[in-house]
Image (cartoon, grey):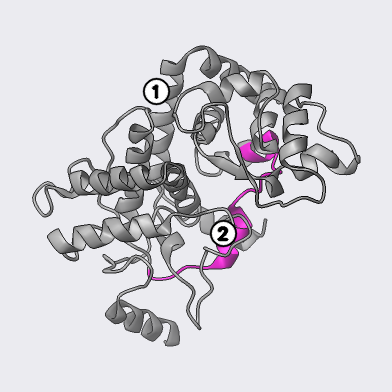
Amino acid sequence: MSLAFLLSLANILILAAAQLRPGFYSKTCPDAEYIVRRVMKKAMEVEVRSVASIMRLQFHDCFVNGCDASLLLDDTPDMLGEKLALSNINSLRSYEVIDEVKEALERTCPEIVSCADILVMAARDAVVLSGGPNWQVKLGRRDSLTARQEDSNEIMPSPRANASYLISLFNKFNLSIKDLVALSGSHSVGKGRCFSVVFRLYNQSGSGKPDPAFDPRYREKLDKLCPLGGDENVTVDLDATPEIFDNQYFKDLVHGQGFLNSDQNLFTNEKTREYVKQFSANQSEFFRAFVEGMIKMGDLQSGRPGEIRRNCRVVNFRSLDILLDDEGK
């Protein structure tokens, strides 16, 4: 990781979180949270998997220069955004659900609710609608004026990441080992592609052999779903209850049935193992830790100038002109 990028991480200040607060739109758009949840519920009825996708958008947005909806910007002739970054391409999805939320809010409260806040509200609602805990979200973020694919490539981990790397990464954002394990519990819902597991099945660490941490019966199941040379876009459940937000994910890790290397390594690593055991045995404790981690992650802010986008995929034209003028000085 480059020195320049590490220095940019230092600009993600927790101090900026002091400006965020629950009920931020209580006067300017009192129905904001109701509207977000209504659209999310409709999206879930159409496709259950969409809620898992929305849940992960917050993580992929907030870790790259703070929670500013830079992730949602489409590429332009002058800007390569984050959607096609290595950890996002063919992985992140359901951007159209965010578009639907934004359109509904613009009809009721035009130019009031930021896309960055929509991501945080929608992620919370994805958890709740899947059977997980509810909590008050702090709001008041502004949307970034630009995005850089390089920033996402520098910071976002791959499915092959091990717990030691993830501990170091989370520490850079003042997120603890407990936060790491709890937030990994977002994999309690949803699916992953065979692309993300074939190396574990057939060539772990270049050994030409499967990961020894696999439960043999689970490995046999994955062998059939993800055969060597097969279609790597086939999707597999991330845990045994992929449509319910619960602590089954941690129970699966204890039994060697984690799908991703970054999942299963949480149990094989001694620094993270105790939290996996704790959450597998106590769902309430997992829920409490997950909420705490989501709030802390939502506090990550860049402190850079922002706006309220009218369309989450593009910056407002006037703001773009100002940005280009500043860069030309």
Residue extending farthest to the top is 281
Rendered position, 174 above or below 61: above
Name the image quarter holding the N terminus. bottom right
Categorize mark 1 by other alpha carbons within 10 Å: few (<14), some (14-19), many (20+).
some
Up/down of 307 relative to 134, above or below: below
Queried whether the magenta region covers residue 150, the answer comes back as yes
Residue 175, percent from left and from top: 50, 36
Q: Which residue is label 1 attached to?
A: 288
In the image, is residue 152 part of the stretch drawn in magenta? yes
Q: Look at 17% across and 42% down and name the residue there.
A: 23
Decide: few, some or many residues near mark 2? Use Cα within 10 Å; few <14, some 14-19, many ≥20. Answer: many
- Percent from the top left, x then y, of residue 314? 37, 72
Mark 2 falls on what kind of element? helix
Q: Foreground residue, 127 or 82?
A: 127
Q: In the figure, 86 relative to 120: above or below?
A: below
Q: Specify whether 57 is left or right of 219.
A: left
**Is residue 215 visible in the rendered structure shown here?**
no
| Of pointers 1 and 2, the one earlier in the residue sequence | 2
Count of labels shown?
Answer: 2
Residue flagged by tag 2: what amino acid is it? Answer: Ser
Which region of the structure is painted magenta?
145-166
Q: Position of residue 67 (x, y in %)?
A: 40, 53
Instruction: Kindly identify the amino acid type of the residue bearing the numbered disc 1.
Output: Arg
- For image coordinates 60% across by 43% down, the residue present is 192
The correct choice, above or below, for 103 with respect to 29 in the image is: below
Q: Which residue is mark 2?
A: 152
The one of 28 and 56 positioned closer to us in this rendering = 56
The quadrant of the rendering that contains the C terminus is: bottom left
Mark 1 and mark 2 in contact? Answer it, CB < 8 Å: no
* Mark 1, secondary structure of its residue: helix
Q: Position of residue 291 (x, y in %)?
A: 38, 30
